[in-house]
Amino acid sequence: MSMTPRPPIPSFIPESAPFTPEQRTWLNGLLAGLFGLQESVTPLSSAEAAKLLPGLIGDPAAPAPSDDSADDGAPWHDPAMPLPDRMKLAEGKPLPRRMMAAMAQQDCGQCGYNCNDYAGALFAKSEKRLNLCVPGGKETARMLKQLYQEFDGAPAPTIPAPATPPEAKAAAVSPPGRSRDNPTYAAFLSRRRLNKPGSEKETWHVDIDLSGTDLDYVVGDSFGIFPANDQDLVAAVLAAIEAPPDFPIAERTLREVLTDGVSLSPAPDMLFQLISYLTGGDRKQKARLLAAGEDPDGDAATLDVLAALHKFPGVRPDPEAFIEALDPLQPRLYSISSSPKTDPARISLTVDSVRYEIDKRTRLGVCSTFLGSRIASGDKVRVYIQKAPHFALPDDPSKPIIMIGPGTGIAPFRAFLNERQATRATGRNWLFFGHQRSNYDFFYEDELVAMRSAGLLTRLTLAWSRDSEKKIYVQHRMREVGRDLWSWLNDGAHVYVCGDALRMAKDVEAALVDIIAQHGGCAPAEAVKFLAELKAKGRYQADVY
Ligand SMILES: Cc1cc2nc3c(=O)[nH]c(=O)nc-3n(C[C@H](O)[C@H](O)[C@H](O)COP(=O)(O)OP(=O)(O)OC[C@H]3O[C@@H](n4cnc5c(N)ncnc54)[C@H](O)[C@@H]3O)c2cc1C
Ligand SMILES: NC(=O)c1ccc[n+]([C@@H]2O[C@H](COP(=O)([O-])OP(=O)(O)OC[C@H]3O[C@@H](n4cnc5c(N)ncnc54)[C@H](OP(=O)(O)O)[C@@H]3O)[C@@H](O)[C@H]2O)c1
């Protein structure tokens, strides 16, 4: 293979700057590339890049640098901030920082990284999949595609959805069941509804059998599940494209690939692009606009794959091209709600089934309804453990803990309590739980009441949002008992929050700041600093989604 000689790289980084010669050379090359003085920058492997620029570039194999390691403080790292505002804050920053700002900022781990490291891996080109951010969805994928083109003007890579059977492509990147890239199989055991009849919610306690696997876990970890699409939806999609279910796609049938290979939820830009090639006139123009992220008819947000096909009736794409235009079906994560100390072979989850209606069709959250209604006892499901080293019980079992987990946010706290019971930890435990109605939505009521009676659960504070005219949320209850919360904090308590990232977690944090300011007798800015210190010491941890 012949090598083209490269022109000398101009120097932008002064000799006095605090970089090694290797870092300086690479940064000069990068800046030359960005300023258009060199045709392109030689991509580094993620390991090389991470070694040269620790903190700026993540390596999936290396320990994750925290966001704090970057000196800009990542002010966009707020899951409640809309994407345009995040991008504005990151304007003018180096490409990896802008890529990070495009992520949904939940650090949820569903992509297999945190937000910073996913951006780093894309920048280092060790990761090419631009559509891994589940909470960011199409919006994030589109922005990443746009940013990706800044590398060298090349179009973003297109990663087709997997047509091969899952077994055939399981890369041995980690032991089975230890990452989303190499899941293992576990058997579904059972589900039990946690709400009583009359509830507006459908939340399930789910048990899965780990005995046929080598998996182990610690409380605080999450469980990754690869779901399967609803068979009625698959049949409707097959009918819409007028394709036979047994049409061969690689070594599988079209129906099989539609079942567990591709997402049938938001219609991806690529599908509209494909449709634009197959139509003409106004329809072509509309499909083109939709592919570019525009909303010609004001219905773009409602278009899942089936609705997109119905919007362009009569389009009959080649089944293989159709599959390639869809996104891969991603696994979903669930906080584990059991302790291995209780039963190492059985893992429990607490799953809220997502169902909503658009245009008279009930849309199903793919994984939550898979666990809540489609999977049957004994069925095997592809799973993995997602470690959560930053969401863990204190090392010292005598430390008090305060757990704030409305709705399914209770999941990891059931696990914490079972663990503290099994290990006879002496620390005090305080749980804030809340949900819609006390009569219907008091998850694990018997267990919690028994733990309260036994003294394990030192305090149980409840907030019911729909029992009265006035909404009562966990943070309202926290403010009512602010003095005691402050006293627990002074006793060294660790604070944990789990559940909704967009509203609840932010409001709970604001309530804590107010409590610290009021009962600690300090200014709000000091209270914010106090909370930041708790976070830095690992005494305030969040598992939010
Ligand atoms: C670390 C972590 C832990 C988690 N733990 C839990 C847990 O313990 N329990 C739990 O239940 N979930 C948990 N989740 C969330 C879980 O991973 C899934 O996101 C959730 O179950 C929904 O997935 P789904 O496949 O059922 O829905 P999807 O098919 O992904 O559909 C959900 C999407 O549907 C859309 N949608 C939802 N409702 C509406 C509506 N009313 N109108 C219009 N659009 C709507 C939204 O775009 C939403 O993103 C956790 C997530 C993370 C990251
Ligand atoms: N990605 C997904 O699609 C997906 C799937 C499942 C759950 N979720 C999200 O994850 C979260 C957890 O769902 P869940 O079923 O466990 O319960 P939930 O919908 O969060 O509700 C739990 C309790 O929290 C209350 N609440 C609402 N806003 C709040 C706020 N700002 N501060 C404090 N409490 C607040 C609710 O009250 P009211 O409802 O009465 O206001 C309810 O009493 C939800 O936000 C849900 O949207 C997302």
Image: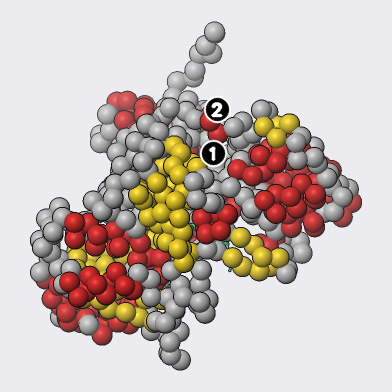
**Label 1 is placed on what type of residue?**
Arg
| Alpha carbons under labels 2 and 1: distance apart | 19 Å
Residue found farthest to the top = 1
Ligand 1 within 8 Å of the CB at mark 2: no
Q: Find disc 1 in the rendering and name its residue.
A: 129
Q: Is residue 158 above or below residue 76?
A: above
2 or 1: tag closer to the N-terminus: 1
Q: Residue at x 42, y 61 (%)?
A: 205
Residue 306 visible, this angle: yes
Position of the C terminus by quadrant:
bottom left
2 or 1: mark nearer the eye: 2
Q: Is residue 12 above or below residue 210?
A: above
Colouring rule applied to residues? secondary structure
Q: Report the number of numbered marks.
A: 2
The label shown at residue 168 is 2
The label shown at residue 271 is none
Q: Nearer the viewer, residue 309 or 170?
A: 170
Q: Residue at x 37, y 31 (%)?
A: 175
Q: Residue at x 73, y 54 (%)?
A: 306
Q: Quick one: SS at disc 1?
A: loop
Residue 506 visible, this angle: no
Ligand 1 within 8 Å of the CB at mark 1: no
Q: Quick one: SS at disc 2?
A: helix
Is disc 1 surrounded by few (<14), some (14 to 19) or many (20+) residues within 10 Å?
many
Q: Residue at x 42, y 75 (%)?
A: 441
Q: What x and y, as percent, mark residue 152? A: 56, 33
